[in-house]
Amino acid sequence: MDLIPPVRLTLAHVPTPLEPLTRLPALGGAEVWIKRDDLTGVALSGNKVRKLEFLAADALERGADTLITCGAVTSNHARATAVVAARLGLHSHLLLRGEDERPRRGNLLLDTLLGSSLEFITSEQWQARDALMATAAERLAAEGRRGYVIPEGGSNHLGAMGYAIGVAELLEQEQELGLRISRIVHAVGSGGTTAGIALGLAAAGREEVDVVGVAVCDDAAYFNDAVARIADSTVAAGYVPSPIRRRTRWRILEGFKGEGYGIASPDGIELIQEVARHEGVFLDPVYTGKAFAGMLAELGNSAPSGGATVFLHTGGIFGLFSFADQLSV
Ligand SMILES: Cc1ncc(COP(=O)(O)O)c(C=O)c1O
């Protein structure tokens, strides 16, 4: 049984490499590969572009002239959306949770460079983010323009198809390299990546692969719910046959968000340094650094079932520059 994907643009540089990690002492000799989705592009670095290929295609079909989305002030998703808008000749309007800063750094600097219109919102307003984005679309409509609202993280029925389809790329590499993937570990921020990976594996008859999403905010109950809802929405949209959905499996790993979303711990900073120094790979303090810590714990805790662990590097490189103070040691 196959997936029935919707229309899609080609924006990501794929296939991204699948490379072995061999030098980091903390791996303890385990077989670990890294799927370099931080290399989906320079401006578009990260997991979000795989989702945006479907979301932006839908926006164009609907005649939109502006992409509207939301995220933290340091959001990779917001920056990737702004890049896609620029590439397609559209405007972007970003609702960003947090305060403006001068000079602007990291993703916020890039949003500025891309000419996005920015609306800074408080944590209280964030609770009403969907309504606020709808209001932004209404404002545009009153000017005779057409906004297209992309939910937080690009995680809906369309966005989830990014990894539902993207997993096939990884499975092809598995075959070419003669591996047997038994586990895929990645960061979870809104759930669309997890839902997509689980759906893609089930579609390929590979639901035995342990899909481990490391929560970088909220908790397992929240994300189990979110991932299930997103996966269900792909069935309702007609992209995923329900027998595939019924076979999806994933796990959410808690205990690695530290003090909270976007807060880096000294241990987290040290791990980012270690990975850079031994493997020449940059992780970020908000997502991939925490997910990598989760993966190391999984390597140590779980009974060895054999096979390869894949760490999905979901990007976040520009986030590093917002943590210059902590990283400058
Ligand atoms: C670098 C990075 N990794 C992982 C994620 C999490 O992906 P998702 O929102 O699909 O759970 C995000 C976005 O939230 C991200 O920017």
Image: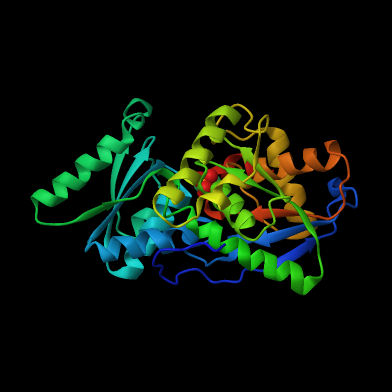
Residue at (68% x, 61% y) in the render: 35
The answer to whether residue 228 is left or right of residue 68 is: right
Indicate the quadrant where residue 216 lies.
top right
Q: Residue furthest bottom?
A: 176
| Front-most of residues 115 and 224 | 224
Residue 228: x, y in percent?
52, 39
Residue 187: x, y in percent?
61, 44
Asked if residue 54 shows in the view, the reply is yes
For the N terminus, the quadrant is bottom right
Residue at (52% x, 53% y) in the render: 318
Residue 231: x, y in percent?
50, 46
Q: Establish if 213 lies above or below 54.
A: above
Q: Establish if 70 lies above or below 88.
A: above
Indicate the quadrant where residue 144 lies.
bottom left
Residue 101: x, y in percent?
39, 40
Asked if residue 105 shows in the view, the reply is no
| Front-most of residues 305 and 308 | 305
How many numbered dots are placed on residues in this image? 0
| Front-most of residues 5 and 326 | 5
For the C terminus, the quadrant is top right
Residue at (35% x, 32% y) in the render: 126
The answer to whether residue 208 is left or right of residue 315 is: right
The answer to whether residue 184 is left or right of residue 63 is: right
Q: How is the image coloured?
A: rainbow
